[in-house]
Image: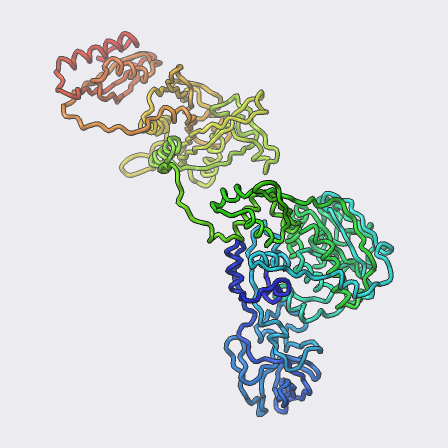
Amino acid sequence: MNVSYQWLSEYVDVSGFTAEELAEKLTRSGIEVDIVEDRNKGVTNVVVGYVKSREKHPDADKLSVCIIDAGQGEDLQIVCGAKNIDAGQKVPVAMIGAVLPGGLQIKRAKLRGVESQGMICSAKELGLNDKLLPKEIQEGILVLPQETEVGSSVLDVLAINDKVLELDLTPNRSDCLSMLGAAYEIAAILGRSVKLPDAEAALQQAGSAGVKAADRISVKITATEQCSHYAARLIEGVRVGTSPLWMQNRLMAAGIRPINNIVDITNFVMLEYGQPLHAFDAEQLNNGHIDVRLAEAGEKLVTLDDVERTLEPHMLLVTDGTKPVAIAGVMGGANSEVTNDTTRILLESAKFAGSSVRRTSRQLGLRSEASLRFEKEVNPEAVLPALNRAAALIAEYAGGKVADGIAQAIAGSHKPVSIELAADRVNNYLGTALSLDEMGQIIERLHFTFEPAGEGKLLVHVPSRRGDITRDVDLIEEVARLFGYDNIPTTLMTGVTTPGSLSKEQSIRRIARNLLTQSGLHEVITYSFTHPDQTVSLPGLYPAAKPISLAMPMSEDRSQLRTSLLPHLLEVVSYNRNRTMDDVAIFEIGKAFITDESALTALPQEKLLLSIAMTGKRRGAHWAQKSEAVDFYDIKGIFDRLISYLGVKGLTYTSASPDGFHPGRTAELLLATSVGSKVIGRVGQLHPTVQQQRDLDDTYVLEVELSPILEAAGDAIVYKLLPRYPSVGRDLAVVVNASVPVGLMEQSIAEVAGDLLESIQVFDIYTGERLGANRKSVAIALVYRHAERTLLDEEVTELHAKVVQTLEQQYEAELRK
């Protein structure tokens, strides 16, 4: 919102304060002023001159020699090259010694042998934004109205000696999208009164058209939810022409281009009151009737920008009962536009719902000053004052006669807002010691009314122009603003503080990401929404989970909450393979949403999962080694490294054949808990059918629930001293049944050997005809060490014999010969 300092001074006394000082006070009180723009770009000594005569230059076809009366006693001879210069005009004249924008100084000169005593200026040469001027005078010299006084300063005539404050308003302060709103704000800051325009008195002076508005026009609201108030006045005998120069200056200062007196007046009043208006050619309306309704499907309207708009049923229209004549609050229709031939006007002022205007303007791509104000909700009590003000101005500057009365329809009334304000609550919020009287004085400066409401309380009546104030905390903010944020005493914060740190879950998730990326995996982040078919072939860790459908999905591909991370990881694998990236190793840490059919009314459980997918080569071809494909043990080894680093104990693997997985290359992950072992994940190769469906080579995946791991993980890293005593190594090779899990053998060895066993490592597994059918040889390296002394060879031999005996008894193992 651009606020002219001169225009503002018509509503509130700003004497004693410059525009820059007002900007500083506004900013300190909560309304930021981005910039204070000086409309004078460096113009001095430019006056209004009268062109007494114009003759062709004797030696130049494109130049004219003009005799100018500049009100200085002697006529001036000025050579001018503008095509539109002519005798009888009043124009801006830069006198000798004048300075124009850019530091151009006007001097006495000769042009083609003819002396020139000054310069006749265009709007651009005066530093004005010529794009805001009527198109016909954007080029050439600026022609001023005939009533302009000769010799007067152009700075005053064109309001160039003005400054404009550009307000950067927050969405809640739509009241300051008007000059009166800005005036109330300035008046509150300075503690001064506001002078409102008296539209009623101006209407009485203008005289009546001798008819009643209700006899010529009628108003009906069909869409009562989208329009609560619609009012119209009839004005007859209108002459469409140029608006007065002072009004054009006000509009241009606000950044609006003058068009004609009717349009300019509606824009002027919109800027003044914040209430958008629209003028219809009454002759183009069916019997002067107005019906505010919603559009019909496929209905069309050519708007004022000559574009045919296809309307939708949610869009609010102003119609004449037979055809639409405007998109309510957005733009009028070309079929009822005011033209130079218009003599009868129906002037509209209404309260349209902001949500309706916002949706329509965005969908149609039509954003205007009017729609901006409607979107933020206009003052419902400004509908009639703005209508009367515009009617009075049209009567004064367009020669119209205003019909008696107003034709209106009211579908809903504004409910006054009254808020109880307690002094103790204000002081507790702000840390001040204001008395109730001091708060009352601040409320009075806002031009709010109030009354006592018990001891230490006020009942404040909020005017409708301040729709942003609905609670006592809003009033407390107003007290703080006007009391002055700088005047609120500062105090140090007190209380118990703790240093910021990561939670255990956050820390472990960070560790997991680092370890997995160091292991050669790339992290991916996929959608939490999925297609209904994604979980059919690969149900993941929770095959019984029922997917939850979204009420308003963005698309069919993203219409359900995922129950597993694996389908989307496989999408990433396929995406990369389709782009010749065959070696893929990725992981994701994210949530799946788990519920069953009986619990659809309850919120789903959000399970934090870790999923890994690997396919392609473990390493590429090299002259020193062959390329190798990834296998089950690559993905298992990466996860084991993570588990080992986190200090999780009691994790075991057991063979499994879940849906979607290879029956012979898949294991379930079991974690020992206080109530027994719990399945927390799965790791293995995809089933060949799934791989074929997705056009994948051998692909290995892991999905594990992280919550049990987070609970079992150690809180701290325990460091040990380096061993001082030597270790003793023993190798062991036994032949067992092929179905015996090596992991169980390792557990049995660890239980028997106890604390003296430092490490256990399987270094060879062999199968062959020499061992017999369904037999395998397992070679294990054991390292023994005592922490406080050197082990004797006899001790190690005895302990190693117990290990062999245990294997023989529990697994029918035989020492390999």
| Residue at the extreme front of the image, as rendered | 455
Using the image, determine if residue 175 lies above or below residue 255: above
Q: Is residue 446 visible?
A: yes
In the rendered image, residue 275, in percent from the top left (x then y), is placed at: 68, 55
Quadrant location of the C terminus in the rendered image:
top left
Q: Is residue 363 visible?
A: no
Q: Residue at x 64, y 58 (%)?
A: 180
Q: Residue at x 20, y 20 (%)?
A: 783
795 with respect to 502 (left or right): left
In the rendered image, residue 661, in percent from the top left (x then y), is placed at: 45, 23
Quadrant location of the N terminus in the rendered image:
bottom right
Q: Nearer the viewer, residue 397 or 27?
A: 27
In which image quadrant can residue 393 be found? bottom right
In the rendered image, residue 308, in percent from the top left (x then y), is placed at: 72, 54
Q: Residue at x 51, y 36 (%)?
A: 527
Q: Nearer the viewer, residue 25 or 406?
A: 25
Q: Nearer the viewer, residue 405 or 769?
A: 405
